[in-house]
Image (spheres, rainbow, N blue to C red):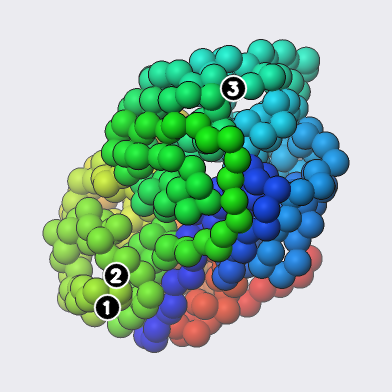
């Protein structure tokens, strides 16, 4: 594979910025949104609530309701971030347990416990939660485990709460700092974003403003891994290498030949890759969203590698599909697999179980001998913009087929 690929605005940042539009009756501008399915679902939810969207302008001055549409919210995990802004501004919200892919039905206790800490009342009927609070009251809330979405949702909820909120054991991802910067631009008072302790002093209202995005580090990391796995010559442009430091160090330890610039990474061919043990961690560690593509790469490395997934349960089950393609992977336990390489992968008809495993299987199909068919590509389209066109531009023989 050879060529250049340009990275757009981060999906995981943009989805939360759309939620910010519910916090203020003023117009906010959100330009250059990723063209992905999760973004379409979020817009559908906002429109159903009564947000008026015109190109990159979002106006929630005339909302019709505060209950999230079940059929839409059930299709993607990020729908839950809308609950914090709705509760903070209107004092009520109802929503179903958020959905998504096979990893989507994850616990939401962080959100429930967090809202209760701010003085909200929670009722559950079936799969629907109803939350009320005349006025959220600032308080201290300690996350028992680091949660990116939990941190973002609580930070938005506390923005309009009365008094000071202190969030501890918070996630430190660049997307959280970007969200805080935008909220502060609108008039919020947030300090500490990007560290384990965030303080929010509530304000009465927020103004309008325009969002400045950040490059999608998961998209960038995925294309860098693809270049190494395919032994190609690829330039990944408009990225932020500082957000990928652990990934890039691990790739170099595995033998990758990388040229790292201020806003680009160039992958160059090498003769052989070395086996490597990897472990996912919260930022700034190796992102769990890059674990599946990296595991595919390790099937091409010489020796025995250990992959340890510490963030999500069930995120290694896709390795059974890689074994069907010719990989030699042993499941040690639900959080660890042993990868023996190099393995010659062969084409097969395969099913995409979730966003990140889906793109990993596409990478496997690209480096495999023969033809592969990947179905359930909606999951991949949820997180990767025009992925078939971008891969084709790098030399992949890929086409989208309508069933």
Q: Quadrant of residue 106?
A: top right
2 or 1: mark nearer the eye: 1
Q: Position of residue 145 (x, y in %)?
A: 38, 25
Q: Secondary structure at mark 3?
A: loop
Quarter holding the N terminus is bottom left
Q: Quadrant of residue 65?
A: top right
User: Which residue is located at x 46 percent, y 84 percent?
Assistant: 395
Q: Nearer the viewer, residue 346 or 1?
A: 1
x, y (%) of residue 326?
41, 57
Which residue does the image show at 20% across and 68% down from the upper left? 256
Work out which residue is located at the far front of the displayed protein and give it.
204
Q: CA distance from mark 3 to mark 1?
A: 48 Å
Image quarter where the C terminus lies is: bottom right
Q: Is residue 53 above or below residue 127?
A: below
Which numbered marker is on residue 35? none
Numbered tag placed on residue 136 in the rendering: 3
In the displayed structure, would residue 30 be above or below residue 172? below
Residues at marks 3 and 2, CA–CA distance in whole angstroms: 49 Å
Q: Nearer the viewer, mark 3 or mark 2?
A: 3
Residue 112, compared with residue 224, is above or below; it is above
Q: Decide which of tag 3 and tag 1 comes sooner along the chain.
A: 3
From the image, tell me which residue sits under label 1: 266
Evaluate whether residue 331 shows in this view. Answer: no
Q: Earlier in the sequence, mark 2 or mark 1?
A: 2
Position of 99 with respect to 345 (left or right) is right
Report whether 162 appears left or right of 265. right
Structural distance between the alpha carbons of marks 2 and 1: 10 Å
Tell me if label 3 and label 2 are in contact, CB under 8 Å. no
In this view, the residue farthest toward the right is: 64
**Mark 2, residue position:** 228
């Amino acid at each position: 594979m050879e060529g250049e690929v340009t990275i757009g605005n981060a999906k995981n940042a943009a989805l939360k910025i759309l939620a910010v539009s519910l916090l203020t009756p003023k117009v906010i501008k959100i330009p250059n949104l990723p063209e992905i399915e999760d973004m379409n679902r979020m817009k559908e939810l906002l429109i159903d609530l009564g947000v008026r969207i015109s190109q990159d302008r979002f106006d929630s001055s005339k909302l019709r309701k505060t209950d999230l549409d079940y059929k839409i919210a059930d299709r993607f995990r990020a729908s839950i971030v809308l609950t914090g802004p709705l509760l903070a501004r209107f004092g009520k919200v109802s929503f179903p347990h958020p959905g998504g892919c096979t990893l989507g039905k994850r616990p939401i206790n962080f959100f429930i416990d967090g809202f209760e800490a701010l003085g909200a009342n929670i009722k559950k009927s079936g799969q629907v939660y109803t939350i009320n609070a005349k006025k959220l009251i600032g308080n201290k809330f300690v996350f028992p485990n680091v949660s990116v979405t939990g941190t973002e949702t609580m930070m938005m909820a506390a923005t309009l709460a009365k008094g000071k909120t202190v969030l501890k054991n918070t996630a430190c991802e660049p997307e959280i700092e970007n969200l805080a910067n935008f909220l502060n631009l609108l008039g919020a008072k947030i300090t500490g974003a990007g560290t384990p302790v965030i303080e929010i002093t509530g304000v009465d209202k927020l103004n309008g403003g325009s969002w400045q995005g950040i490059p999608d580090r998961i998209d960038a990391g995925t294309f860098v891994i693809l270049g190494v796995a395919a032994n190609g010559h690829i330039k990944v442009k408009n990225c932020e290498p500082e957000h990928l430091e652990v990934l890039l160090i691990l790739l170099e330890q595995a033998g990758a030949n990388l040229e790292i610039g201020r806003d680009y990474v160039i992958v160059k061919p090498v003769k052989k890759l070395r086996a490597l043990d990897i472990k996912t961690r919260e930022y700034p560690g190796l992102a769990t969203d890059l674990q599946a593509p990296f595991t595919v790469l390790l099937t091409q490395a010489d020796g025995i590698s250990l992959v340890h997934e510490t963030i999500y349960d069930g995120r290694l089950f896709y390795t059974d599909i890689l074994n069907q393609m010719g990989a030699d992977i042993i499941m040690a336990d639900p959080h660890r697999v042993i990868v023996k390489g190099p393995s010659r992968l062969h084409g097969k008809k395969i099913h995409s179980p979730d966003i990140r495993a889906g793109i990993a299987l596409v990478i496997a199909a690209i480096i495999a001998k023969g033809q592969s068919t990947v179905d359930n590509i909606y999951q991949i389209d949820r997180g990767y913009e025009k992925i078939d066109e971008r891969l084709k531009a790098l030399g992949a023989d890929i086409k989208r087929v309508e069933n």
